[in-house]
Amino acid sequence: MRLIVGLGNPGSEYAQNRHNVGFMAVDEIVRRHNFAAYKQKFNALISDGRLGTEKVLIMKPQTFMNLSGQAVGEAMRFYKLEADDVVVLYDEIDLAPAKFRIKFGGGVAGHNGLKSMSQHIGNDYHRVRIGVGRPVQKNQVANYVLGNFGKADLDWLVPLLDSIADAAPKLTLEKLNDFKVAVEQKLAKTAPLEEDKPKPVAAKKKPTEPRTPKTVKLGNPFAALKKLKDKLGD
């Protein structure tokens, strides 16, 4: 079984944050591939289904970003999984918007969600890094990732999440390079990707990342973004 984890913060106030792009990505996989409705378990929202012939558990930790690894570790122990069975999708400020990369193992690069993951399950898990760019000022990173995607971002965000969901069955393969190729091929049919290095953008002021859980409000932020994009295109 493969465990696919999207990182983010629970609650509608964070639903369209850059930091929640991992949640958005797995939500679209669940929707596209007719997974079961989310239910609460392991201090997370989980959904089970199949990608190809492989049984898959989708997980969105509800512990907030800083404690994501707790929920993942609990699920791994319950299902007797190894770190190599885990794929994590998350926001990456060191990649330009619309870029994504596949990586196995490595450090956490200051990402609080990955830091918690590594504390609880080690570093040897698969990673899908989704580029969101970085702010001009280094001291504005927290405000930036906790800021919402803008209208202009929808032009690349919707096709990217759509392509990730379309290629999701390849996330169950031993080597994930086929997944990367499939996403890139579909994106090439929509719009060219931007250069590798992210262009700094100004961050709007916003409270620092939450550390204590709040009431979880369910919803599909990707669907909301897609609806907004369609409306703007009319």
Image: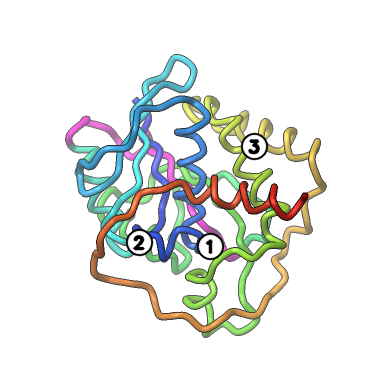
Return the disc, 3 or 1, that comes first in the chain's sequence. 1
Residue 163 image label? 3
The residue pinned by badge 2 equals 65
Extent of the magenta region? 78-94
Amino acid type at mark 3: Ser
CA distance separating discs 1 and 2? 12 Å
Residue 205 is situated, as x and y percent measured from the top left of the image, at 52, 84
Residue 106 versus residue 67: which sits nearer the camera? Answer: 67
Q: Residue at x 28, y 54 (%)?
A: 62
Look at the numbered discs 1 and 2 and tell me whether their residues touch, using CB distance below 8 Å: no
Q: Residue at x 63, y 53 (%)?
A: 228
Return the disc, 2 or 3, that comes first in the chain's sequence. 2
Q: Which image quadrant: the N terminus?
A: top left
Instruction: Give the number of the mark in front: 1 or 2.
Output: 1
The residue pinned by badge 1 equals 18
Q: Residue at x 47, y 80 (%)?
A: 206
